[in-house]
Amino acid sequence: MHIWAGEHVWLQRWQSRTETPWPPEDEKWAVAQIAERFEEVYAARAAFIATIKPEALVREVVYRDSKGGLFTATLSDMLMQGVVHSIHHRAQAVNMIRRAAGVTVDLDYMYWVRKPV
């Protein structure tokens, strides 16, 4: 749930929208609900990114964080944070699963894009 909330929050920030409150940490979601929410935020993110023109990457975006603080950053820096932050949390989840002797997928970017010669 936290990973989804982060993805959702960064999309709102990129769009200079008011951030909706994070769901309570003790709220329980079924796997189907989590999958549906991820699909929705990924579709909205793809639609937003498809509209970005190169000149928009350097524009300053003003947003409030979840504590109400007012911040500004370039859209390109905010997009990068969205990528880096998501990877950070996925790595945490993979490490936790591995410590519990579970089987995990490879998260390394090159694993997914490389092609055998």
Image (cartoon, grey):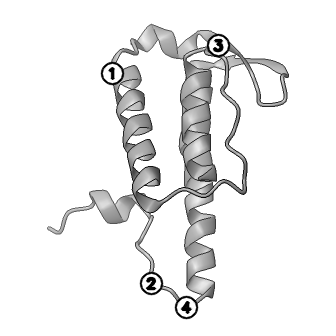
Q: Give x and y (percent) for residue 105.
A: 40, 73
Q: Which residue type carries mark 4?
A: Ala
Q: Is residue 80 at all visible to an observer of this figure? A: no
Q: Secondary structure at mark 4?
A: loop
Q: CA distance from mark 4 to mark 1?
A: 40 Å
Q: Which residue type carries mark 3?
A: Val
Residue 20 vertical placement versus 57 (above, below): below
Residue 27 vertical placement versus 57 (above, below): below
Circle 4 crowding by C-alpha within 10 Å: few under 14, some 14–19, many from 20 = few
| Mark found first going from the N terminus, 4 or 1 | 1
Q: Residue at x 33, y 21 (%)?
A: 50
| Mark found first going from the N terminus, 2 or 1 | 1
User: Dot 4 corresponds to which residue?
Assistant: 101
Q: CA distance from mark 2 to mark 1?
A: 35 Å
| Mark found first going from the N terminus, 3 or 4 | 3
Please tell me the numbered disc located at residue 61.
Answer: 3
The quarter holding residue 46 reads top left
Q: Secondary structure at mark 3?
A: strand
User: With 44 as the anchor, is 100 left or right in this view?
Assistant: right
Q: Which residue type carries mark 2?
A: Val
| Mark found first going from the N terminus, 3 or 1 | 1
Residue 98 vertical placement versus 109 (above, below): below
User: Dot 2 corresponds to which residue?
Assistant: 103
Please tell me the numbered disc located at residue 50.
Answer: 1
The quarter holding residue 42 reads top left
From the image, state whether disc 4 or disc 1 is nearer to you: 4
Q: CA distance from mark 2 to mark 4?
A: 7 Å
Instruction: Say whether marks 2 and 1 touch (CB < 8 Å).
Output: no
| Mark found first going from the N terminus, 3 or 2 | 3
